[in-house]
Image (spheres, rainbow, N blue to C red):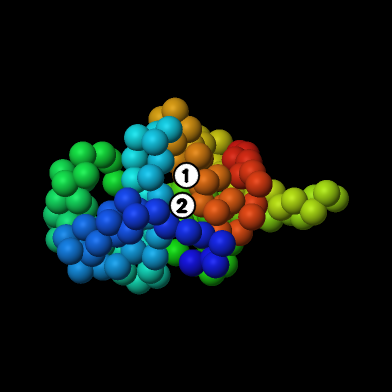
Amino acid sequence: MPENIKLTSQELELIQIFQRNSGSTPRDCIIDDAMNRIIFVINKGEMGLAIGKGGQSIKNVQKYVGRPVELVEHSDDPKEFIKNSLDPKLVSEVRITDKLDGKKVATVVVDEKKKGALVGRGGRNAERARLLAKRYFAIVNVHIVHQ
């Protein structure tokens, strides 16, 4: 987790709840009030443990916190991390561009027929990708385009 990320006591408590229910320790927890969800960033290779057999671990956490819970597998590579925060099976390519003003922007290329599924209802998946890209890699925006 980047050094500039500070967790609140509520986020730390949610991490403990998640750990007790799944046996997996999340790297990060984000309470997204705008989309009424909690996002956990999971260590690479621990997604199965975090979800649990038949999805039981995640269901227990959702029941306990009373909100939808979303999981994203961490990666130190910004392209892979953005892909993980969306749906890796639907993403064709991720490009990261440095703008003249020094800001970074990511462009996600997806098949035209799958763009709606990738973006998600109300843009919730796209917003998750933007939130995490900014938090971890100082990427100011994530554009989703079709081929």
Q: Nearer the viewer, residue 100 or 117?
A: 100
Find disc 1 in the rendering and name its residue. Answer: 128
71 with respect to 2 (left or right): left
- On the image, the x and y values in percent for residue 135 come to 55, 54
Q: Are the residues flagged by discs 2 and 1 in contact, CB closer than 8 Å?
A: yes
Q: Nearer the viewer, residue 20 or 141?
A: 20
In the image, what residue occupies the spot 17% across and 57% down? 57
Q: Quadrant of residue 66?
A: top left
86 with respect to 100 (left or right): left
- The alpha-carbon separation of the residues under discs 2 and 1 comes to 7 Å
* Residue type indicated by callout 2: Ser
- On the image, the x and y values in percent for residue 55 come to 18, 54
Find disc 2 in the rendering and name its residue. Answer: 85
On residue 29, which mark appears? none
| Lower position in the chain sequence, tag 2 or tag 1 | 2
Q: How many marks?
A: 2
- Residue 115's place in the image compared with 137, above or below, is above
Quarter of the C terminus within the rendering: top right
